[in-house]
Image (cartoon, rainbow, N blue to C red):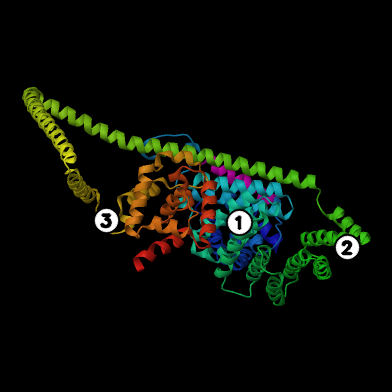
Amino acid sequence: MFFVLLVACTPSTKTPDPADNDALQASTTLAAIDSLMWRQPDSAFALLKQFAESPQADSLDEFNGHYCQLLISELLYKNYAAQSNREELLQAVAYFDSLVREAPHPPLKGGAQRAGDSKKISNLTPNLVFLAARAHYINGAGYYEKDSVVNACAEYLKALEVMEEHFEEKAQTGKKAVFMFYIYNRLLELFSAQFMMEPALSCGEKALAYCRKDTSLSKEIPNTYFHIGKQYDKNGEKDVARSYYEMAIEEISDTNSPIYRDAVSMKALCDYQLGLGAEQSLNTMKQSLASVTDDGEKVVRFLVIGSVYSEEGIYDSALRYFELAFENKSDVTSKIRAAESLRVIYDSLGDREKANEFMRYLADHKKSEGENKALTSRLEGMYKTYMDQKRKEEAEEMREKSIRKTVEIIVPIAILVALAIFVVAKRRSKKLLEDKDRHYQREMEAKETEARKELEEKDKQYAEVLEAERQAHRMEQAAMSGRLKRSNQELRELKDQIKQKDDSVAKTEKAASFNEEPICRLIMDRVNEGQFKSKIDYIVYKDSALDKQQLLDLRLAADRHFGQFTARLKKAYPELTNSDLDYCCLYLLRLTDADVSALMQRAYYTVSERSRKLKGVFGSDEPLSAMLRGFANESTSN
């Protein structure tokens, strides 16, 4: 059947007549199969087989022939079959790349040109770009099947470049959003396998963002939470890893699924590593193991349970679970992990013969440290090159947007001003001179009047000063004669009255709600306009930074609406600094760490660390904005 598919979808050297009904029908059928593939890959594969046996398959032109080969590769992959048309797929990759390179490049709105225009294609050919990106992605999957990790990574990154180069983020919806999730999810798995936690976490967060962007991917959210948690786990950040495992558990509705058992077991392991007793964690892990029927999944459970027994020094139980894991035939990676643990335990027990047996197995099956480092180094270099290019393009795009925005504002204003000047000069040239003379005379008269008033005011102030001095002198004399105490009392009362008046003047009107305070609206306007990104250097957003007065205004607004919020917070948590209170007031507005980084002009990592510190101070795992809102509202509820 595969041979029939391969032959039927081979591009024809003959260019069919556009009026040929079979050729048009073939193109329509392939598009229908493509559409179905995203929802029901098994049904789409069955339709592709039927198509290969139909007369339509004999009328494929060059485009549809390569399109058909791409669909074959994708459907083999989605139906868990090995990729068997490598040579034809590589030809399809080159073909679609050539179409994208040769596509027309229209000017920007208004006819303007800018750097990078050669990379933008017309609205008539976006499907070509999508096909080119899909071809690179599925080619990467083929390389991965052959254990060519570097080539697979290069193809996944190329697929990302093609998508991000030609489609703005807001256009990456529907199938494109699903496709972007596929890419980032594969990169997450690839980098995770090489213990490249930082790139893996970055790709995991991107994959999670696309899960939330399209409802069809909502079922992938718990799985993505779990894999992000694993990266933090590998990085030694057990508390963060545990929170992600917990979020995954909360999102999973099927409590009998492997991913649910994975999350429960790994959370139990984190609980143990964070100080919970071994017995409770082991009981949880063993309960998950009891419902497992798949041999591959059992191996994973054996390794986790064995690691706890080994850590506790209960070597007889640890050996039993690790040996069960080592006995599996299919998962070489798990066998290697089991062999490493068995070697360490037997070495600790003094059984050199057994330890050497597993040492020999590891020597035969495990890649050398040099090979692993070389592979990781190449992957890190590729990812760094991709990120550097992406940052450069983002900076260029921001610069271009800034220029366009400036031009769009200045040019219309300049035109209107020029027209106004021309019209006024045309109609009122003579009258303007007369008006200027009259205006000058009035201005001089006004200045003279103002000068006289100023002089009179100064005379009055001088007289008041003299009177004040005389009064002071009289008060001194009164003090010498025994009346000073009464005068001082009168003076204090006068000062109190003045202070009360000053206080009443200084009070400002309280807005209807905290979010409607002028300072809060100013901050939210900057956030909405800036669209701050965590991956962009905060220095880029320096124009959006808040000064000390604005931070003070924000504190006063919080105190007005939430019953002296900052004083109550400081009293409840004395270890908070004044700077911490500013951050807490910002989180009251439900800002993200990226927003706070830009507004406070601090590195995203620094702000993230501050967030973790504050959560530690408050002793709460819930988001800071929710916790602080609850604390703030205590004053209103009381």
**Can you see residue 297?**
yes
The residue singled out by tag 1 in the image is 185
Q: Name the outermost residue toward the right.
A: 353
Q: Which numbered disc, 1 or 3, marks the residue that appears first in the sequence? A: 1
Which residue is pictured at 58% across the width and 46% down the height? 96
Crowd rating for badge 1 (residues with CA inside 10 Å; few <14, some 14–19, many 20+): many
Asked which quadrant contains residue 410, the reply is top left
Check the image and report above or below for 288 versus 484: below
At which x and y percent is residue 152? 68, 49
Check the image and report above or below for 425 versus 230: above
At which x and y percent is residue 29? 54, 61
Crowd rating for badge 3 (residues with CA inside 10 Å; few <14, some 14–19, many 20+): few
The kind of residue tagged 1 is Asn
Does the residue at mark 1 contact the one at mark 3 (Cβ under 8 Å)?
A: no
Q: How many marks?
A: 3
The kind of residue tagged 3 is Lys
**Gap between marks 2 and 3, in whole Å?**
73 Å
The quadrant of the rendering that contains the C terminus is bottom left
Is 436 in the magenta? no
**Can you see residue 22?**
no
